[in-house]
Amino acid sequence: MIKIVTIIGARPQIIKAAAISRCIKNSFKKEIQEVIVHTGQHYDKNMSEVFFSEMEIPKPKYNLGVGSMSHAKQTALMMEKIEEVLIKEKPNLVILYGDTNSTLAGSVAAAKIHIPVVHIEAGLRSFNKSMPEEINRIVCDHTSTLLFSPTPTGIDNLKNEGINLKNKLPYNIDNPGVFHCGDIMFDNAKYYIHKAEKKSSVLKELKLKNNNFLLATIHRDNNTDDPKRLNSIFSAIHKISSKNKLQIVIPLHPRTSKILEKNLKPQLYRSITENPFITIIPPVSFFDMINLEKNSLMIITDSGGVQKEAYFYKRPCIIIRSETEWVEIVKAGAAKICDADENKIINAFNFYKSSNLKSLPSIFGNGKAADFIIEKIIRNFKNV
Ligand code: UD1
Ligand code: UDP
């Protein structure tokens, strides 16, 4: 039996973990035991608990209750608590997702006590080290034993950083295995959409019609914490909705809702909150979110995961960042990088309003990335 400790903490990691846990439960119960550790990085009910129940993710055996604080304090506290758990549980490997502080803490804590790290969503780069996530990804990739990249671009990035793609079994931290596996978020998008369409009543509750509203999410620290950028983004959103009499639904991340009034100019804040076409709501469940995505006219976002889901459901995407790790989506013509530039955002909206995204290339695999990943893990760790 292979024992895995899965470390999660932030919303997108909880969602990603659903794909791997489901795969273990359905096909590999005899070979694998999974222990889930939640760092507590996200803790509001609608940022964490809601996903466990809705997506049937096994309850974490440990919740480290770390909560919100500065980068160094949060990462250090996580590392200390993760190390204690790893020493107690003695897993054969640790699974980590993405690029949050929970990922960074897990990778350093595990690697230093010689527990192999498996990084899912490896190789992604923005080439912008002012993003905390870019530092987290690089450290995690370079402490990993197995690296699973959803895209060929991710594989190229690892190669360019000196990781040998020709390494052979058995893999270890100095001889890591690199695999192109497709995207577990695509596994989830395919698996849950039918359940979501049956169970979610969000469209009805918000009185939204198919293809007749925009969906927006904003949470990157460089957008929320820089008043100039935040004003520019919300000014574009206000103008698009008013001019086109178009509903815009914004499930707002707590980081953004806490700072919105402080960082928006008073007049813009008033215009936004009084605009009958703009609906700001708390974060929604995954079923509500994918139902909103699939039925929207277009998506405006700075989220990595939401960019991809826009592509899965064939919705045009306006990326409010200066670059993206998901360059394939932009190359396919399904998304435009607009930064926090009001004019670029409005122009991208006008462009996509009158265009149709029908035949998009298949970029993110076949919906079976989790099976592929688990099979590779078993091959490497079966004799440990
Ligand atoms: C984190 C990740 C980011 C990811 C995002 C997903 C890092 C460095 N960043 O950013 O990569 O895209 O999660 O959502 O790990 N808060 C609450 N309730 C919660 C969680 C957070 O109110 O349940 C508020 C707190 O005021 C906190 C702020 O949100 O200070 C930011 O939370 P934090 O986890 O530090 O970073 P995110 O912006 O969520
Ligand atoms: N999401 C959700 N409810 C929301 C907003 C996002 O369920 O109100 C989901 C979304 O469908 C995607 C994931 O959260 O699967 C993306 O996470 P987030 O935007 O927080 O982080 P990122 O992907 O940018 O790291």
Image (cartoon, grey):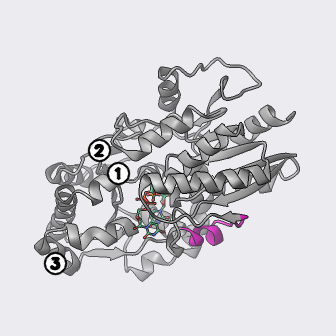
Question: Ligand 1: does it lie within 8 Å of the C-beta at label 3?
Answer: no
Residue 175, compared with residue 324, is above or below; it is above
Q: Badge 1 is on which residue?
A: 316
Query: Disc 3 residue type?
Result: Arg
List x then y, in percent, for residue 9.
56, 59
Is label 1's Cβ within 8 Å of ligand 2?
no
Residue 107 pos. (x, y %): 60, 42
Q: Residue at x 40, y 53 (%)?
A: 303
Lower sequence index among marks 3 and 1:
3
The secondary structure type at the circle numbered 2 is strand
**Residue depth check, mark 2 versus mark 3: number of the one nearer the observer:** 3
Q: CA distance from mark 3 to mark 1?
A: 29 Å
> Does the residue at mark 1 contact the one at mark 2 (Cβ under 8 Å)?
yes
Q: How many marks?
A: 3
Q: Position of residue 251 (x, y in %)?
A: 38, 69
Residue annotated with mark 3: 270
Residue at the extreme left: 267
Q: Which residue is mark 2?
A: 336
Q: Which residues are magenta?
A: 48-61
- Amino acid residing under circle 1: Pro
Does label 2 or label 3 sit earlier along the sequence? 3
Camera-nearest residue between 350 and 268: 268
Q: Amino acid at mark 2?
A: Lys
Left/right of residue 47 with respect to residue 89 in the rendered view? left
Q: Residue at x 52, y 70 (%)?
A: 285
Q: Earlier in the sequence, mark 1 or mark 2?
A: 1
